[in-house]
Image (cartoon, rainbow, N blue to C red):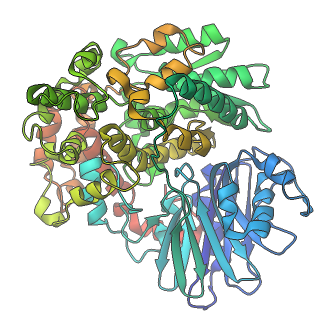
Amino acid sequence: MCGIAGLFRLDGVRHPALARHLAAMNRIQAHRGPDGEGVWIHEAGLGGFAHRRLSIIDLVTGTQPMTGSCGNTICYNGEIYNYLELAEELPDYAFRTRSDTEVILAAYRKWGRDCVHRLRGMFAFALWDEERRELFCARDRFGIKPFYFLQQDGLFGFASEAKALLPFLPEIRTDLTALMEYLVFQFCLDGRTLFHGIRELPPGHTITVRGGNAVTERYWDVFYNLDFDHTAKHFEEKLRHLLEETVRLHVRSDVPVGAYLSGGTDSGIIAALGCRLHREPEWMAFHGRFPEGDAYDESRYARRIAEEKGMSLRIADITSRDFVETIPKVIYHLDYPVAGPGSFPQYHVSRLAAGHRKVVLGGQGGDEIFGGYVRYLLAYFEQCIKGAMEGTLRKGNFIVTYESIIPNLVLLRNYKPLIQEFWREGLFEPLDRRYFRLINRASTLEREIRWNEIGGYSPFEAFQRIFNGPNVGSESYFDKMTHFDFKTLLPALLQVEDRMSMAHGLESRVPFLDHPLVEFVATMPSDIKFKDGTPKRVLLAAMRKEVPAEIFERKDKMGFPVPLNEWLQGDLKPFVHDLFTSRAARERPYFDTEEILKGIARETRFGRKAWGLISLELWHRTFHDRQAVIRKSLEEGGTAQ
C-alpha cells in the first residue's frame, strides 16, 4: 500500500521544475507511505514518478519506483494477491525481487495492456513503456485504490489523492455538476470530483498517454447473466468455497494482519475467516463505539464474535470532543466530502488499528453485492402493496410476496422518517423514479441551497442511465438497485475506506471485492439473494457456521451510526454555530447559512443533512480558503494541511 504520483508533459516541452514538484507531491502524500520514498525522472525529461511506500510485501527489495529488466518503470499502489501464481506463469522473466510490483512489470512485458485481466487484487499504477514512449495507467475493477488525474496546460498529472494535484490548478474551483450530484447522492458520478479540473479514473478502466493524447478505456464490468439451472444449495456451497479462497489470499502478507469488527455479519464473517486461516500467533480485531447508549454501541456483538473465535479485541471510545478535534483532519484526508458520517468513526478505529497492525481486513462491499440495505426492503414493500391491490402479485417476476415480507418489516422500525418522506408523493411511480426518490437527499435541502446559483443540471438522467443500463435485465428490480449502488455508492465508500486507513499509514483490504466472487454472485437469481425480503439471505445461509447465531438474527443493525445529530443539539451547538456564522461561510455563493442553522436544529436522529452541509463548509475552509498556502506548498514542500 502506497502513495503514487507523477507528472508528464503532453506537449513535449521539458518540465523546468520536475524534481522539485515530484518531491512536493511526495511530501503531500507522506502519510500514505511512512516506510520510504522514491523519485524517478526520465532521462530525457519526459516526466517522472513520485512514490511513498508502506512496506507490506518484500520489505527489503520492493522499493519504488521500480525499473524492470526491459527498461519499463512502474509506480504502483495496492496488492496483487495472486502474484505468486502469476510469477509461476512467467518463467522467462528474471525476477530480482519477491514483490508483486515486479510481477506487474513482468506481466506487462508478456501480455501488454491485457495484463490487467490477470491481476487479482486492488491496484492503481502508472507504467512507463520505454519502447513505446507512452504512459499506461490502470485502476482495479472496483475502485478500491484511488487514481486522480488532471490535464492542464500541456501537463498530465496523477496522484493517489486529489490534494497532491491541487497546486497545479490555476485556481481551486467547485465543479458545479459534481456539487449537484453530491447534494443529491452524497457522491459524484462519471469520474467527477468536487474539484473542477481534477477527475477520477473510473474503476475497471485504463488510461494511455502518448504524444498529446490521453485515452481512457474500460477493461472490466460486471454483468448479471443469471443462472436459473442450479439450486440454492449449489450457490451456497460455491459461495462458501470462494469466500474461504479470497480470505486465504487476502491474509498473504510479510507483516501481521488484523481485522475491523463492527458487530455485524459482513465484518464478522471476514474477521472469523481471517482468524481461522491466518498464520499469526494472535488475531487482533478493532471496533469503535460511542457512549450515547445501545443505539450507538455494538461492542457487545463484537465481543461475542471475538470471544467465540478467540480474537483479541481492541475498542476505540469516540466522543463529541473527538469530533471537534479531528473532523477537519477527516475532511482533509477525504479530499472532498463523500458518503455519510461513518468516515469520522472509521478515522478513529483506523488510528487504533495502526498502533497494532499494518494490515486489516474489512467487510466493505457485502451490502452492495448481496443486498444488505434496508431501503431495498422498503422499495419492495411498496411494490408488494401495489401488486396486492392490482391482483398482479403472482403474475410478474416477484421475488417477495406481501405475506412473506411481513416478518422482515421489523427492520424498518428505525427508518420511519425515511418512510414518511418516501411516501410523501409519487407513490407507485415507475421503478427508476421510486428508487431515485428513495436515495435523493436533495429533497430535504429546498431552503438551505440556492439552487438557481448552481445551474440546471439534473442528476436524474445520469441516474437512469446507470439504473436502467444494459448490465441488468429489465425484469429485476433487486438487481437494478444493487447494481446502481455497486457502481456508485460502493466507490464512494471505498474512498472513505482508503483515506481513513491511509491517514494513519494502515492498509485496509476488502475480501468481498474479489472479482471471481463478485462475478459469481452476479449470476445468482434475485430470489436466491433476497427471498422473502431477507437481506443477504444467501450469504447468511452459506456462512452461518462462521459467526454466532445471534449476529445473523439481529434486526437492529444500521451500519456505523453516529450520534452527530444528538451532539448538534448539545455539545456541538457552539461548534456548528461558529462554523456557519463566520464571514467566509456567509459569503459562499450556493448556501443560505441562516436556513442551514434552522435546518440542522430540526434534523432527525439519523438524518444526513447536517453531515453533508458541515462537510461542505469544512471542505471550503480546508481547500478553497487556503489556495495561496496550497500553491506555495508546491515550491516549499509543505503539506498544506
As displayed, is residue 197 above or below residue 314? below
Residue at the spot x=56%, y=45% of the render? 503
Q: Is residue 418 visible?
A: no
Q: Is residue 570 left or right of residue 155?
A: left
Task: From the viewer's side, name the closer residue of 121 and 590.
Answer: 121
In the displayed structure image, the side of residue 62 where residue 258 appears, left or right: left
| Side of 580 where 238 appears, left or right | right
Q: Tell me the residue at 41%/47% (across/down).
A: 331
Residue positioned most to the left: 425
Q: Is 118 rendered above or below residue 129?
A: above
Residue at (44% x, 31% y) in the render? 345
What percent of the width, then of the height, locates residue 638? 56, 62
Residue 570: x, y in percent? 23, 25
Task: Decide if residue 471 is on the left or right side of residue 467.
Answer: right
Residue closer to the observer: 96 or 121: 121
Quadrant of the image occupied by residue 199: bottom left
Q: Position of residue 150 (x, y in %)?
A: 48, 72
In this rendered view, identify the residue nearer to me: 501 or 469. Answer: 469
The count of marks equals 0
Whether residue 440 is situated above or below residue 178 in the rendered picture: above
Residue 83 place in picture, x, y as percent: 77, 49
Question: Is any part of residue 192 visible from this angle?
Answer: yes
Above or below 596: residue 400: above
Q: At 46% across and 14% down in the image, what residue appears?
A: 552
